[in-house]
Image (cartoon, rainbow, N blue to C red):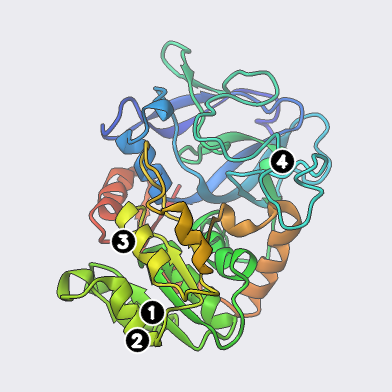
Amino acid sequence: METQGKVITCRAAVAWGAGEALVMEDVKVDPPQRLEVRLRILFTSICHTDLSAWKGENEAQQAYPRILGHEAAGIVESVGEGVEDMKAGDHVLPIFTGECGDCRVCKRDGANLCERFRVDPMKKVMVGDGKTRFFTSKDNKPIYHFLNTSTFSEYTVIDSACVVKVDPRFPLEKMSLLSCGVSTGVGAAWNVADIQPGSTVAIFGLGAVGLAVAEGARAKGASKIIGIDVNPDKFSLGREVGISEFINPKESDKTVHERVMEITEGGVEYSFECAGRIEALREAFLSTNSGVGVTVLLGVHASPQLLPIHPMELFQGRSITASVFGGFKPKTQLPLLFTQCLQGQLNLDLFISHQLPFSDINEAMQLLHQGKALRCLLRL
């Protein structure tokens, strides 16, 4: 390709400050270095993690200018030295948490936080040389990276450990959903909680991740799925993924966990906190059955926050854990998920609530911020 080995100038949505509108402007993107890949991003979408970073909720993450974004799909433009598992033209997903395949975490079953390429909200440069690959087109000043990916750009450079090749039969317009939100929710149900057939489930927060948990729970044969959200507009979509009971905390004179206890006659086996709110986490924990209850934390919480649980409460037979990317090892386990999607085991279409051009990215941010969207698919 004519661009291989050369600096590319392209459009990107640049964050210049916390809460400020993203600025669509030309940026320069360097060629990939050793064990890196340069991608042409075709579709990207916005996750609550992007929203949290955009709002500047964690001061430690505030490095500007910066290119956000981590849910995306694209095509390999070129690869750096040493990259052997993909080539120019391959369809791929950028993944915010990588898999080197060599560290003790990658070699261990049931663990997916690679020691070298795990998700790091504070990371702003490449692993190989500690430098950025983005620069302003006018004065050549560095622009920082985000979550190993930086997909709010027509081109981006990513460590090859954070890129997964996918079957070209799968439509790319749906790919971004599997690079974060849907995989995170489904994997939490399948890999982390390991939901058993006939069990009961409560999901706190019915955004894209929460609905993906429900989709995963239904596929695993859960007998009852309860959805909790303050926005009743989400309940119709909830029914499409198997949620049969709904609780709006604003419309009940009882606490949510009291309602869950009544519905299930003793609490659910599994609860999932997908709202990013401490009070929701507390209610999720108390909604589980005393003896076998498991709570899985998925919501993004602003810092600093502490778990709202007394240590002695863990002696009541309830446990709590967290999930990153649904427990999936991206390179070795996602290909099976792609196949399952091709076979129709998961319905991805319902998660795309809006489709907009890349130039409307600020509108997409506001739609998610206002709770009016699940995922806004942006076409670059």
- Mark 2 / mark 1, whichever is N-terminal: 1
Instruction: Out of 219 and 156, give the one closest to the viewer.
Output: 219
Can residue 244 be seen in this snapshot?
no
Q: Position of residue 101 (x, y in %)?
A: 80, 44
Residue beneath label 4, please?
161
Q: Residue at x 51, y 37 (%)?
A: 150
- Describe residue 75's horizontal placement relative to residue 217 as left or right: right
- The answer to whether the residues at label 2 and label 1 have Cβ atoms under 8 Å apart is yes
Which residue position is annotated with label 1? 226
The residues bearing labels 1 and 3 have C-alpha atoms spaced at a distance of 21 Å
Q: Which residue is mark 2?
A: 263
Label total for image: 4
Q: Which of the two marks, 2 or 1, is nearer to us in this view?
A: 2
User: Real-space Cα distance between discs 1 and 4?
Assistant: 37 Å
Mark 1 vs mark 4: which is more N-terminal?
4
How many angstroms separate mark 4 from mark 3 (CA)?
Answer: 31 Å
